[in-house]
Image (spheres, coloured by chain):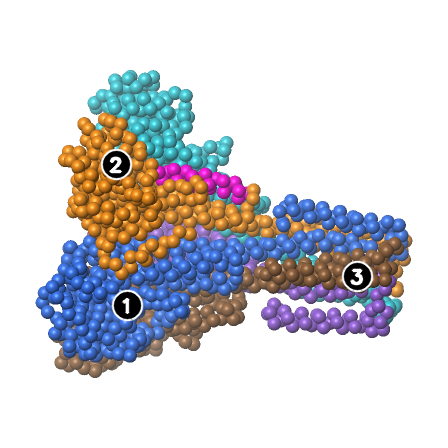
Chain colours: A orange, B cyan, C purple, D brown, E blue
Amino acid sequence: MPRFTRNYTKKIGLPAGALIHLGEQKVEEPELSVISYNEAEVRQAMPKSFGEVEQYRKPEMVLWLNIDGLHDTVLIDAAGKAFGIHPLVLEDILHVGQRPKIDEFEMFVFIVLRMLSYDDACERVVEEQVSLVLGDGFVLSFQEKPGDVFAAVRERILKGQTRIRRQKADYLAYALMDAVIDNYFHVLDRIEQKMERLDEELFSDSSMETFQRIGAMKKELILLRKSTWPLREIVGSITKSEFDVIDEKTLVYFRDVHDHIIHAIDILETFRDMASSMHDTYMNYVNNRMNEIMKVLTVIATIFIPLTFIAGIYGMNFQYMPELSWRWGYFGVLGMMLVLFAAMLVYFRRKKWF
Amino acid sequence: MPRFTRNYTKKIGLPAGALIHLGEQKVEEPELSVISYNEAEVRQAMPKSFGEVEQYRKPEMVLWLNIDGLHDTVLIDAAGKAFGIHPLVLEDILHVGQRPKIDEFEMFVFIVLRMLSYDDACERVVEEQVSLVLGDGFVLSFQEKPGDVFAAVRERILKGQTRIRRQKADYLAYALMDAVIDNYFHVLDRIEQKMERLDEELFSDSSMETFQRIGAMKKELILLRKSTWPLREIVGSITKSEFDVIDEKTLVYFRDVHDHIIHAIDILETFRDMASSMHDTYMNYVNNRMNEIMKVLTVIATIFIPLTFIAGIYGMNFQYMPELSWRWGYFGVLGMMLVLFAAMLVYFRRKKWF
Amino acid sequence: MPRFTRNYTKKIGLPAGALIHLGEQKVEEPELSVISYNEAEVRQAMPKSFGEVEQYRKPEMVLWLNIDGLHDTVLIDAAGKAFGIHPLVLEDILHVGQRPKIDEFEMFVFIVLRMLSYDDACERVVEEQVSLVLGDGFVLSFQEKPGDVFAAVRERILKGQTRIRRQKADYLAYALMDAVIDNYFHVLDRIEQKMERLDEELFSDSSMETFQRIGAMKKELILLRKSTWPLREIVGSITKSEFDVIDEKTLVYFRDVHDHIIHAIDILETFRDMASSMHDTYMNYVNNRMNEIMKVLTVIATIFIPLTFIAGIYGMNFQYMPELSWRWGYFGVLGMMLVLFAAMLVYFRRKKWF
Amino acid sequence: MPRFTRNYTKKIGLPAGALIHLGEQKVEEPELSVISYNEAEVRQAMPKSFGEVEQYRKPEMVLWLNIDGLHDTVLIDAAGKAFGIHPLVLEDILHVGQRPKIDEFEMFVFIVLRMLSYDDACERVVEEQVSLVLGDGFVLSFQEKPGDVFAAVRERILKGQTRIRRQKADYLAYALMDAVIDNYFHVLDRIEQKMERLDEELFSDSSMETFQRIGAMKKELILLRKSTWPLREIVGSITKSEFDVIDEKTLVYFRDVHDHIIHAIDILETFRDMASSMHDTYMNYVNNRMNEIMKVLTVIATIFIPLTFIAGIYGMNFQYMPELSWRWGYFGVLGMMLVLFAAMLVYFRRKKWF
Amino acid sequence: MPRFTRNYTKKIGLPAGALIHLGEQKVEEPELSVISYNEAEVRQAMPKSFGEVEQYRKPEMVLWLNIDGLHDTVLIDAAGKAFGIHPLVLEDILHVGQRPKIDEFEMFVFIVLRMLSYDDACERVVEEQVSLVLGDGFVLSFQEKPGDVFAAVRERILKGQTRIRRQKADYLAYALMDAVIDNYFHVLDRIEQKMERLDEELFSDSSMETFQRIGAMKKELILLRKSTWPLREIVGSITKSEFDVIDEKTLVYFRDVHDHIIHAIDILETFRDMASSMHDTYMNYVNNRMNEIMKVLTVIATIFIPLTFIAGIYGMNFQYMPELSWRWGYFGVLGMMLVLFAAMLVYFRRKKWF
């Protein structure tokens, strides 16, 4: 169980805009990477300090600054001042674990996303906060730790005369959001594999542990929903062209992202239905086992208890029991027992008890 | 269980508008069919390559181009260029497994539908994506594999002076959508037959397998809902005349389609209620069996355990047990047992245990 | 189980507006009845063919044409042509089993209602489609078979100087709708009586069959909801004066109908809650029986199994068992058993097991 | 179970506005009481017939006419004519059992409320319809039987220079509604006491009857909801100043009533949650008892069945059974049994079965 | 179980605006504290009577008056008169137990919040009403008893030139609301710890009591929801700048509070899901135990009942039973029993019953 509240309590009582990193430190040193491009040229660098960033910011070029690692609040503060970002936004960037949201400010739009990846070792979904600041001519992206999810975008920019190089910063923001959301399908794919394994297990080898794994699966799906549903609203509000920094012409791409999100939500809901039906199947399986056990008990007890009673009768020590001295008494009783035994079997068979 | 995610992961990391077919190849060769008509004349052809299509496109005539089979991305790309279709739309056509949707572009409207058919062999519903592009004077339809669902529409056009020949492309789009949705009732009909069989089975021969078949039925209904509900919104938005390429006069026909969809949804929801109540009935049936079994066990055990105890008493080997030497001791005990037996039967009968 | 889909599949593939009757033929011959009235005079007739109707249509008089029986598509077609009714409307009139709806056309408003009646013989609710066409100066009503639900309205018109004679066609439409909806309370009343009987049975004589009857009751309530909920919307849209053919002054009467519908829905929802709680009560009853049975089994088994064991001890044939030769051994053991028996009884009594 | 439908069926087939009293007659004779006041003076009377009322109606004074008892339709009709009330409103006043609602007419506003009181004798909630007609300078209130709920308002008017005497008729309407709604808290208080008793009973003395009382409690809460939820809408629409006869300055008081209603709804919903959790607790309690019983059975049976088997072995009559002639055979077997007995006890204790 | 209704019934029948304190008296003497500040200067005092307050109210300075303890209605009345507060607002301040709400009046905004704290001794959440009145240049805050939740705000004001000193009264209101809501995370944190303990207990030591503690947890979460959900609406309406006394520039801070509330709600909903799944796990655990017990019973009974029957056979006293005199009869029977015993063990093992 992840801790939902502990980090948050660190900042109780502090004034708004106080910069404290609420997550764990996931990298040694924050890493900056800068790309500045237009259709004609592209420049890339990995500056060591924030001072070097400023030179890449030029009119007519799109600047993309990516920061991996958020524990260095001085660096974040400097970035905020250089690009004119409101302190409350910086606070939100550092307070990882935010709900996805979009906020418009005078000079920029601030977007919080949750990046999902699947940790194959622990067999569970890992969440990370990705913050985007989209201003006039620049995009800032903040990640908790380095990841390769933006690699494809970077490559497309560097590779040359593709569509992305002809477009403005809003298209870059779209490309980054698309990269984050495309990754959801990787995660959904892994979960689907897990469900398939669980589904097989359900009929071959169901146990208390199966139940717990279905429960864990459900919890994961709930967490995924919490990351995905708000996205729908966010991208939906973009497609309704509510934001000035995003151009009309780019909206068609955001509409495409919107479709992807809705598709992901559809799959998620289907998974939830499937997890519920697994739960039902498990409960039914357990019930059926119980019934089967009861049937065996009942068949055995119901057959042998009367027979034992008959044997008990002739085990009594009365002096005058005429049957005892009959020549065929013993075999007669055995025969009677056999008939009774057979009759009961037939009865139970007809009742489909075995 | 169909795989919801696998195809989708193929395209992660690709830029928007990259043309990759995400479905399975269901035909050897894509098949083109062209019909061009107005009230006075009609021309039909099955061109081998896309180049031949252009000659059928004439002002004052409605062009219907149907493509069966989507794996030839070059062909799709050519069609897109000829009719001025946005790359994102082509992407959506190829990425089968989309949610039904409607998107308006400057020159055309793009509609994604899910065609349902019932595979009698596998006893399950088969889904296929049908995409329609409705522009000024033309309708393009894309299917994954050839099917006879549009045959009735084709025939009506060819047959002659019917209403469809007097109308424009928007009426053709309506006719195609209507054909797709009418087919839903075929599928619902088959499902209803399946439910009826299941309902009978429920009381005659209920088993773990019945439970699984109810579950499978429920899953199918969920899939159907996912195809049907978005349609309601789509056609609803058409009837509110939000789209320029659809004429006011055609709206009354779309309103009719809207009624059909709502009717189909109503039936679906009724089926869902019925499937739920089947589930309840099954669970109750299982519970009742359990109770019945327990009753038999209890009746038998409760009758014979005390009797066996009495027999046990007189099977003891004490030297001084006066009853043993009584002349009628044995028969007295037998009689006592009989009385006890009868009393218990009466008691259980009164309690309605059998 | 009524068949939801079978009729509908008859018309798959046909063009919109094709006139086919989808219901069963419920009368030998369709029956026409015409009433034409204003405040001063009233004329009534039962024309044999449609040709005779036309003469009753006069300015300044309200014409009410009622047709019972829908299988004669030629007649319906003639009516449609005479009153200028759109072919899609005629189609809807013939395709019985429609969802209640209201559609506005240029010259008239088309209303589909579901008439409910309670078949005392079969103990179930019977549905029938009633279609109304309200135009300028006329109301057409279509029923599947003759019924007495409109008799009260007819009588009020014929009887004389009542409010209905002073009003226009829209008031007549209101009166007919009111008659249909008032009938719902008859049906609800019968269902309530059925529920009361079921409620009594629940505690006196619960069985698998009770469960099935609760289930059947629930299904009936679902069907009723499907007829009633859409009505709320329909009449609601009327009261918002969205339709031109309905006068402002008549709206207050439709508001009254609206209240009745909401009241009926309220009762329906209460019945649903009650049916659910009956289900719960039944399940609890079954559980309680099970517990009771288990208690009896446990009490009997727990008392006699140890006693039988003791008897078994002294039934062993060891040569050296000193107790066997004691003078009071037998009675001592009997006494010991009695004490054990009593102790167990006290224990179970204290545990409240019987 | 109250009868929901029976009264309603009385009026099926009658035209709108027909005056029939649908409730039971709860008083011998309807009782009229009139108060006419302004800041300076107040007059009160109990007229015997409606004719005497008219003289109290004066400009610049607020007239409050209260009628207790609704079976005298002639009286109601006279009141309607004197104050210009629409026949449909009079119908609603007489058709008790209405859903709470508010309707605006040209000259007045018509409000239906449900008054709740708790019948201590029958331990159940009693409902009564209260209708208010608020016109320019007058308020009419109709109750099914005399009650003391309006006594506090009457006293405040008579007592003297309080706020109510300075205000208009709309404030009087507010005061009456407030009195009705305040009473809900009395009822909620009684229900809470009942729940507390039930909650205690749940752990001390749970039985089938407890289950039924929880069910009855739930039904009562459902009825309460039906009276309360519509009120929220009604008073909400008043606070949005949709009605002309209610002055802007009085709205703040209706806002206060709105808060009370929402508070009552909050409490109701909490009670519903509590009733549900009582249900769960009861089910769990029953399950636990069952488990406990099964454990006892299992422990006893599992211990003694094997022991009895051993005794059975040495009760066999084979001629050659060497153990039987051993000197310590009997005591050896007894010892063995004791060891087995102890081992089982330890095993069950470790499994926490007792 | 807290009493929801009792206090409320005290005021039934009283006119609106009557000042009665509905809570318990939680302090000996109400405590007043005044802070008056602007960017340049700050003054603080703890006046003994309300008369001293007035001198601190100056133009260009923000006045914050905090009152702890509400039972002195005379004091509250004086405050109301001094700041021009509507009697209904004073009533709401004294009627603690209100639902959170925001009301706008001509000269001020009135906000009711619920402050939550966690009572470590009783292990439960404690609620207290906090009322804020935000007017032009002043904020009044009313608490039921002294608490340290506003201490951080007070300190920030006194400490010096921080942002709060440069802002107006609306920022102060924000700071106080933020302090109240930040405290929710403390409470959520404690609840999370409790859930973790419960989760562990669930698998180690589940009992009837665990069930009750899960139920208590659920009730607490329901109470929390009732405090939190209305806040969302309240702060949401502030951020839509519906209130005049709150400046545009301060809205960004309220947006931040809005995010916090939504985050708290998210956590709450997650906790609810977790509590539900704990409930399921508990039920499953109980079921599994039951199954395990039944299995043991069945295995033991099914093995020994047939064996006992065999022993019973050879315990019969027939004179002619040939096996009895066979030399190896006894050992043969023992051997046969052993074989049967082993066979059953194998059978059960294969069925995975132990």
Q: Which image quarter: residue B63?
A: top left
Q: Are marks 2 and 1 in contact (CB under 8 Å)?
A: no
Question: Is disc 3 placed on a helix, strand or loop?
Answer: helix
| Magenta stretch, main secondary structure class | helix
Q: How many numbered circles are shown? A: 3
Q: Which residues are magenta?
A: A183-203
Q: Which image quarter: residue B77?
A: top left
Query: Residue at (72%, 47%) from the top-left corner?
Result: E342
Label 2 environment density (alpha carbons within 10 Å; few <14, some 14–19, many ≥20): some
**Image spot of residue E310 (x, y percent):** 78, 53
Q: Which image quarter: residue D330?
A: bottom right
- D202 vs B133: above or below: below
Amino acid tagged 1: Asp
Q: Which residue is disc 3 drawn over?
A: D332
Q: Which residue is disc 1 drawn over?
A: E148
- B224 vs C269: above or below: above
Q: Which residue is disc 2 drawn over?
A: A46
Amino acid tagged 3: Gly
**Image spot of residue D116 (x, y percent):** 34, 70
Question: Does the segment drawn in magenta span residue A186?
Answer: yes
Between marks 2 and 1 in the image, the one whose residue lies nearer the viewer: 2
- Calculate the distance from the C-alpha at mark 1 to the C-alpha at mark 3: 76 Å
